Amino acid sequence: MSRVEVRLDGRTHLAVGLMSGTSHDGVSAALVRIDERKSPPTRLVAFRTYPYTAEFRARLLAASSDGQDPASKAGAGGISTLNFELGRIFGAAALRVMRAARVPIRRLSFIGSHGHTFFHLPPRRAGRATASTLQLAEPAVIAAMTGAPVVADFRPMDLALGGEGAPLAHLWLFGHQRLGRVVQNIGGIGNATYLPPAARTGDRRLVAFDTGPGGMLIDALAARLTAGRLSMDRGGTMAARGRVDGAMLGELMRNPYFRRKPPKSAGREEFGAHYLDAIVRCARGRAMKPHDLAVTVTALTARSIADACRRFILPLGRVDQLIVTGGGARNPTPMKMIAAELPGIEVMTAERLGVDGDALEAVAFAILAYQMLRGLPGNIPSVTGARSPAILGKLTLPPKSR
């Protein structure tokens, strides 16, 4: 494979990883030091999340859609404008995290930007439609603002090869010689990654897939039940006051997505506003109390995670630890539920292992950018379902060297 013509002088590199998740809350920026001579090769230097303004978040949410054609809502001009606005927001986030770490921008080797996923329809959900994915946050704007090479748009090549377009870099951070681990991110959507003991990139037992709803439904329900006063069930206090409706939980778990075999990915198309509307209608028909509904929806996240582990991961090999990352790791209610659902597996947060779980996804895109610049594959076909390994990402060079 040919190497990309970007000089990575020396063996140690400083990089910024940028991403915005399905919760539409802001941009996460991680400054990392990469040195393959060390174990682990990646060390977090600084991490910050920069929230969107309320006005911008409302516009971004309004432009997004649970349906198959978000462009019909935003229009071409609206999408183009959001792309460049997000580019400025992402570029500012990179500059701000560098300032927070008191690291001069001239020392930055490159930026890996996932962007904001505006629409994602992988092949296994596309049916007769054309599989496609669209991430916003114009990399040319980021490169112009920072003066650094920017690697972005990681998903399309994997999608073009028949994959789910969901790359990962967890082996760099959580691989273990003796322990089988599941890294379970609970962001807006839940995502599980299985790392068998002593796993390597080509290990066919490596799998990663979306388990279903993470905190997205919980947050949206909290906002609805409080008429917008709350944006989330902080600390799980609302759910802690209710009782799970076992019959309703059983009905929710019959959603076909949970039985679908990996590779698979989910988003607002499956578990967005239209899905919450159906849940609320069902709850009204059962005359459920608000707190009982809150804890039942929380239990859906926990049970779908545990069910995915039992159904799709345990048949592949042993699981000693389930490591939770993302905002859900700070909510004790689903954490306790997951532990109760998976006896014999140690359920812990990434912080127990010295890894900032909130920073994990942003760090991953710095790693994927590094792989691209070295001319190395960034996808794992056994994880995404792609026909072959591939170099992921598109390089945008700054207008001039710093």
Image (spheres, helix red, strand yellow):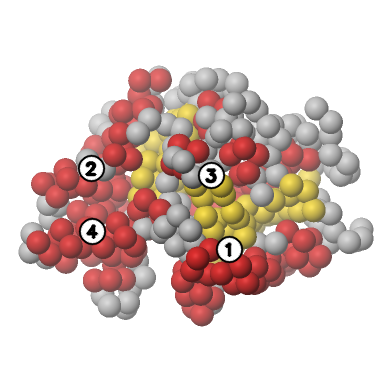
Check if mark 2's residue and mark 3's residue have beta carbons within 8 Å: no
Q: Specify the label residue 278 is tagged with.
A: 4
In the displayed structure image, the side of residue 190 where residue 6 appears, left or right: right
Residue drawn 65% across and 62% down? Answer: 137
N-terminal of the pair, mark 3 or mark 1, is 1
Which residue is disc 1 drawn over? 27
N-terminal of the pair, mark 2 or mark 4, is 2
- Position of the C terminus, as image quadrant, is bottom right
Q: Specify the label residue 186 is tagged with.
A: none
Closer to the eye: label 1 or 4: 4
Q: Specify the label residue 130 is tagged with.
A: 3
- Residue closest to the eye, 189 or 241: 189
Q: In this view, does 141 lie above or below 263?
A: below
Badge 3: residue crowd in 10 Å (few <14, some 14–19, many ≥20): few
Residue drawn 49% across and 61% down? Answer: 70
Check if mark 1's residue and mark 2's residue have beta carbons within 8 Å: no
Q: How far apart are marks 1 and 2 (CA)?
A: 32 Å
Q: How far apart are marks 1 and 4 (CA)?
A: 30 Å
Q: Distance between the residues labelled 2 and 4?
A: 14 Å
Which residue is disc 2 drawn over? 253
